[in-house]
Image (tube, rainbow, N blue to C red):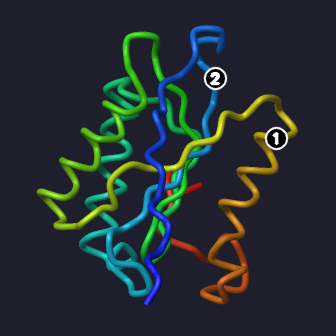
Amino acid sequence: MSSLPQRKNLHHSVPSWVKSGSKFFVTINCAKRGFNQLCRDTVSNSLLQSVEFYHQKCRWHCSIFLLMPDHAHAIISLPPNESMPSVVKSWKRYTAKYCPISWQSGFFDHRIRDDESWEEKAQYIRLNPVRRGLIEKIDDWPYRWPKA
């Protein structure tokens, strides 16, 4: 049996030339994929409350956060005194302890460069449960923040 290629660890540090307050599309995966770990009422409520808490405490500014059964998508920006790796790691550590969830190490991020790209990514996030056949209309998905 041949060995699979090893996944590269991405550094996630924001280059100094990136404007402060830039928005990032972020995906965070559960360690075990393929079954529902996040879209259960007790777990999802705790996760979404923690998203709001981080938003209120200015650890991140979250425009949208959506849970899927085995991963989460978000659009966030960070204050100048925060680093994306430390904030995401802190959030994952907290949620793993209190939910409990086992997250994959690391995360995926993509810097959003303009308003058109922001809307494309936000629509991608909103439509994810529709594309997966979990709901018919975007408004039917309860596992998102903010709710409206």
Task: Answer above or below: position of 17 versus 85.
Answer: above
Residue type of the residue flagged with mark 1: Ser
Describe residue 119's horizontal placement relative to residue 65 as left or right.
Answer: right
Q: Position of residue 66 (x, y in %)?
A: 52, 60
Residue at 36% x, 30% y is 56
Answer left or right for 142 relative to 89. Answer: right
Left or right, 75 with reference to 36: right
Which residue shows up at 30% across the image and 62% down it?
Answer: 103
Q: Position of residue 117 (x, y in %)?
A: 82, 41
Q: Residue 135, position in %: x, y?
A: 64, 85
Image location of residue 130, percent across then percent down? 70, 79
- Asked which quadrant contains residue 125, the reply is bottom right
The amino acid beneath tag 2 is: Ser
Of all residues shown, which one is farthest toward the right?
116
Task: Name the residue that disc number 1 marks.
Answer: 117
Residue at point 48%, 51% (across, down): 8
The N terminus appears in which quarter of the rendering?
bottom left
Image disc number at residue 18:
none
Q: Secondary structure at mark 1?
A: helix
Q: Mark 2 highlights which residue?
A: 22
Does the image show residue 146? Answer: no
User: Residue placed farthest to the front in the image?
Assistant: 1
The secondary structure type at the circle numbered 2 is loop
Q: Quadrant of the C terminus?
A: bottom right
Residue 63 falls in which quadrant of the image? top right
